[in-house]
Image: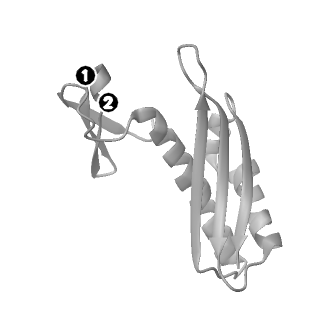
Amino acid sequence: MGEKTTATWEGGMEFDIELHGHHFTIDADETVGGRNKGPRPKPLVLSALAGCTGMDVVYFLRKMRMEWDSFKLEVEGNLTDEHPRVFNEIFIRYIFSGKNLEREKIEKAVKLSQTKYCGVTAMLEKTAKINYEIVLNQ
């Protein structure tokens, strides 16, 4: 089948998630019976998007031999009002710092990720409009 994860109920709304031998907790907030012991499942999708496209960009920029001092992604999502509430708009900010940043290479790496390689983007763009910007701090 492919990928597999396991969610084991720990009481309340808390689950222990096992994925590739790693464990983490997801939970809900107190208003719906949780104890706020971990992130909520839906926002983790935004984290998955950040990780997926971030890894792509690092891979491509390394191949292009471009160096940077720091790289951070900020991802925000807007949910629909009606249930099932899904992301209908997502905005990604790619933030780089460094002395010798080359905008053309960064734009190419981001575009390759967003249009061809990031599987999380490909899944999410079926329900959400995804926009992004590149910020360079030199």
Q: What numbered label is drawn on residue 14?
A: none
Which quarter of the figure is the N terminus placed in?
A: top left
Please identify the quadrant where the C terminus is shown.
bottom right
Tell whether 33 sits left or right of 104. Answer: left
User: Disc 1 versus disc 2: distance between alpha carbons?
Assistant: 7 Å
Question: Callout 1, which amino acid?
Answer: Gly
Element marked by disc 1 = loop
Q: How packed is label 2: few (under 14 Cα within 10 Å), some, or many (20 or more)?
A: some
Closest to the observer, 75 or 56: 75
Tell which circle, 1 or 2, labels the residue nearer the N-terminal end.
2
Residue 25: name its quadrant: top left
Report which residue position mark 2 lands on.
28
Residue type at tag 2: Ala
Residue 5 is left or right of residue 88, and the answer is left
- The location of residue 88, given as percent across then percent down, is 66, 29
* Residue 76 falls in image quadrant: top right
Q: Secondary structure at mark 2?
A: loop
Left or right of 41 on screen, residue 23:
left
**x then y, percent, for residue 136:** 72, 70
On residue 33, the disc is 1
* Residue under the image location 28 percent in, 52 percent down: 21
User: What colouring method underlies this structural image?
Assistant: one colour
Q: Is residue 8 above or below residue 39?
A: above
> Circle 1: is it few (<14), some (14-19), or many (20+) Cα within 10 Å?
few
Asked if labels 2 and 1 touch by Cβ distance under 8 angstroms, the answer is yes
Residue lying farthest to the front in this orientation: 31
Please state the horizontal and vertical placement of residue 111, each as a whole percent of the image: 77, 56
